[in-house]
Amino acid sequence: MDFRKINFGLSDAQSERMDYPNLLKDGYLNISQVIETVNNPRYFLFLGYKGSGKSSLSEHLKLCENDYIVEQQPLTNFPFKFFDKVINSEDRTIKYKIIWRWLLCAYVLSSLCKDLKQINEDTRQAIAIFTQLGLFPVINISSLLKKSSTTTISATIKSLGISHSINEEYAEADMELLTNYVKDIIATITEKKPYLIIIDELDDILTPNGRQFENIAALINETKELNAYFHYNNILVKIIILCRTDMFERLPGQNLNKIKQSNSFTFTWYREGIDSNKHSDLVSLINKRAKLTYPEINDVFKEFFPQNYDNTNIYSALLNYTRHIPRDFVQLMNYIQQNCDSEYVTKTAIIKGLKNYSTDYFLPEISNELSGYLPSVAIQPVFNVISSIRSQSFTYEQFIKIYHDVYALKNIDPLEILNILYDCSAIGHTHYYKENNTTRVLFKYRNRSTAFEKSDKILLHRGLWKAMNVDY
Ligand SMILES: Nc1ncnc2c1ncn2[C@@H]1O[C@H](COP(=O)(O)OP(=O)(O)OP(=O)(O)O)[C@@H](O)[C@H]1O
Ligand SMILES: [Mg+2]
């Protein structure tokens, strides 16, 4: 057996599905019974940090289409500004809700009809009218939003002969009327296989000036209501939303906490406890994928690696360089593999692999994550500040001293930067507990409910050491 021959995967699920679909079909790890959770009608919101496997779930379900029909709806480059063009109402919350309900219902109807062989005559006529007026077929939600002008909606209502009981000027009422009509048609369709509509790439709104937190909150609230409607009317349709945890936490509205408690699943790869790393789901993921090349393999780390590194067992030593998410761990395996010159992994290959991983993957990945929250011109200077401290750990005061001399950062609150760095686990800290005179290392990926605390000593994540030249 040769370590170099194993295919551990790529850094994102979309590319992986194109090049190695089998890795996402048979090499997919059903973490915390996530597939069973998809099948449970109550759960529709899947939360996870960047690289935690949200899109992988979507691609896995798409590849298992024998069990479901799956429609993927990435909201990349979503034209949010059209929300104001469709309905010009002052109350944004209501406007967003009404428009999302329309978009989702129309999308569901159009998708269902595409796959159905038998549709009743009334539905067929309605679809013909939607098509005539340019609303159907719905290729994606973005294009439907662009086409849903007030005039098209009211023309559709007229052609369908739905009675107007309300003032025609009132665009919101028109949209609601048409939405209810569409909802009623959906209820008449009998679909045999579960139909999953998966909305992904919501974090596209994190681009500067693109923040649409209220709008996304409305999408989530509306999806909950529609899923309940589908469920209680025995309609086998479910809308699933994949969302970054850090973004979800910034959305407004009290309802969302209830949704998080009752209707969401969170991808959690980190586990506390003795021997937890050896039995980590991340180790199982690597072994599962290795088995596709060598079915007889049980433990890649036992088979190919030195049993200790950094004076620590190999499982913990390697996982310490990650934020306990699959993207980090798969990439670490890939970089080590690229530096192997025999069928086994040597210490030299690990050292070289870690260096490449840190500079070519980890630092850019963290930068990419920060770019959702900081102006792009500020990102490199932040790392320059950290790198010039020249230490794996430092205090808030040390950071501030250098920070204040950097012109590019003069309008950004340093505490905001440190909070963001903490949230993506680029930094952690050691916290001292007076009560029992102990110190604990805290990182967001391990201690989800913690926040940055400026009186604590700051620790740079090990994955950044080589890239920041503090690896000594
Ligand atoms: N359950 C899993 N089983 C096997 N591999 C996985 C699993 N989850 C994630 N991976 C691996 O991790 C990589 C990154 O995952 P993915 O692209 O799904 O992350 P994401 O949460 O969608 O990230 P982003 O927020 O950046 O879009 C995948 O390409 C795949 O190799
Ligand atoms: Mg993704």
Image: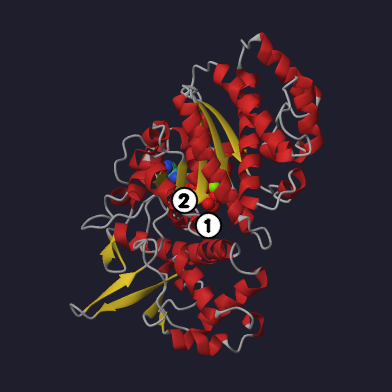
What colour scheme does the image use?
secondary structure
Mark 1–mark 2 distance (CA, rounded to whole Å): 8 Å
Name the secondary structure under disc 1: loop
Q: Which residue is label 1 attached to?
A: 252
Name the secondary structure under disc 2: helix
Where does residue 413 sit, x and y in percent of width and height?
A: 56, 79
Locate the N terminus and report the quarter of the image it occupies.
top left
Q: Which residue is label 2 attached to?
A: 256
Mark 1 within 8 Å of ligand 1, using the beta carbon: no
Where does residue 180 sit, x and y in percent of width and height?
A: 62, 28
Q: Residue at x 20, y 58 (%)?
A: 274
Which kind of residue does numbered mark 2 sit on?
Answer: Leu
* 58 sits to left or right of 446: right
Which kind of residue does numbered mark 1 sit on?
Answer: Pro
Q: Are marks 1 and 2 in contact (CB under 8 Å)?
A: yes
Instruction: Say if residue 6 shows up in the picture.
Output: no
Relative to 335, does residue 96 appear above or below in the rendering?
Answer: above
* 362 sits to left or right of 78: left
